[in-house]
Amino acid sequence: MAHDDRVAIRDAVGRLHRESGLPMVFGGAITGRDRLQITEFVGAKSGTMRGLRVQAGSGLGGKAMAMRRPVLVNDYARADAITHDYDEAVTGEGIRTMVGVPVLVGRSVRGVLYGALRGTVAIGDRVVDSMVTVSRVLEQDLAVRDAMERRHPSSAIFPLPEEHALEQAPPEIRRRLLDLAGRVDDPDVRDELMDVVAHLAGNDGATPEAHLEEVPAAASGSVVPRVRLSPREREVLAQVAMGHTNALIGERLGVGAETVKSYLRTAMRKLGANNRIEAVVAARRFGAL
């Protein structure tokens, strides 16, 4: 699980860099009991922090882990609200201002996302909010993946060891590649990713969308139509996947919480799901989200 968390945190760090505008962002996954290892960086100028192991309660990230909430300091070297076990590594990057946001799944801390500035300019609420939002999306992604692995252990995501194994790639691999293609700016790289997805689907160049129109039934091996959700149902499920409550979803979509519940119930019925998490898992499996 630690390896998968690291891959997810790497993706989240890239997204955080794009959405926060911070010059340096980084993060790491929990690798042992109450211990974090920082492995993912964007904007680093030295290697002083790479591989740094942070104990819960120590330093800024350790405090965020222990308190389970974001922690911000505007002058790291002089901050008396944190311990200074890692000053040499932090100052080696020239960091002055830093914020750490814990990644929580259920009752467990799974990692920490960091943002940093090399000056004493304060990090504003908008930036902190964007960090929290990215963290919440990551938390939901990890929760969904955990649920999928519990219900379908054989579909757990592992690196494909050989090129010939592509034909046996599970649908989740195709979904992740599609998601990655949608976030790539370079058109050549995006097209290449789409070609890989088409190859995995065995479509000989057909578009992934055409493949997703039909889904193999788990028991019989027959083909069943893709579940079709209304645009509003997809919007609600997308918000659920981000970890938002019904009240917040209603506020964002301009409808009441009861209306959100109605859309969610309808989507759950179409997807054969018993709860919110199952609905998100099923929607992604069927290509409806």
Image (cartoon, grey):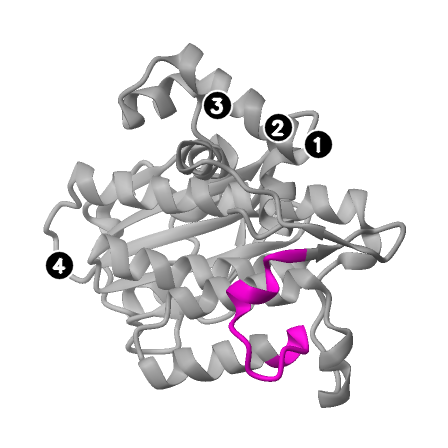
Question: In whole angstroms, how far apart are the C-alphas of marks 3 and 1?
Answer: 14 Å
Residue at the location (28% across, 44% down)? 130
Q: Tell me, yes or no, if residue 1 can be seen here.
A: no
Q: Which mark is residue 263?
A: 3
Question: In whole angstroms, how far apart are the C-alphas of marks 2 and 1?
Answer: 6 Å
**Label 4 sits on what residue type?**
Gly
Q: Position of residue 125 (x, y in %)?
A: 19, 37
* Among the two numbered marks 3 and 1 on one chain, the one whose residue lies closer to the N terminus: 3
Question: In whole angstroms, how far apart are the C-alphas of marks 2 and 4?
Answer: 49 Å
**Label 2 sits on what residue type?**
Met
Label 2's element?
A: helix
Residue at the location (10% across, 51% down)? 121
Task: Pick whichever, 227 or 29, lies toward us.
Answer: 227
Task: Pick whichever, 250 or 162, lies toward us.
Answer: 250
Q: Which mark is residue 14?
A: none
**Mark 4 or mark 1, whichever is nearer to me:** 1
* Among the two numbered marks 2 and 4 on one chain, the one whose residue lies closer to the N terminus: 4
From the viewer's perspective, tell me whether residue 50 is left or right of residue 129.
right
* Among the two numbered marks 3 and 2 on one chain, the one whose residue lies closer to the N terminus: 3
Question: In whole angstroms, how far apart are the C-alphas of marks 4 and 1?
Answer: 52 Å
In the rendered structure, which segment of residues is drawn in magenta?
A: 199-214
Pointer 4 local density, CA inside 10 Å: few below 14, some 14–19, many at least 20 = few
* Among the two numbered marks 4 and 3 on one chain, the one whose residue lies closer to the N terminus: 4
Pointer 1 local density, CA inside 10 Å: few below 14, some 14–19, many at least 20 = few
**Pointer 2 residue:** 268
Q: Position of residue 145 (x, y in %)?
A: 65, 49
**Pointer 4 residue:** 119
Residue at the location (69% across, 45% down)? 146
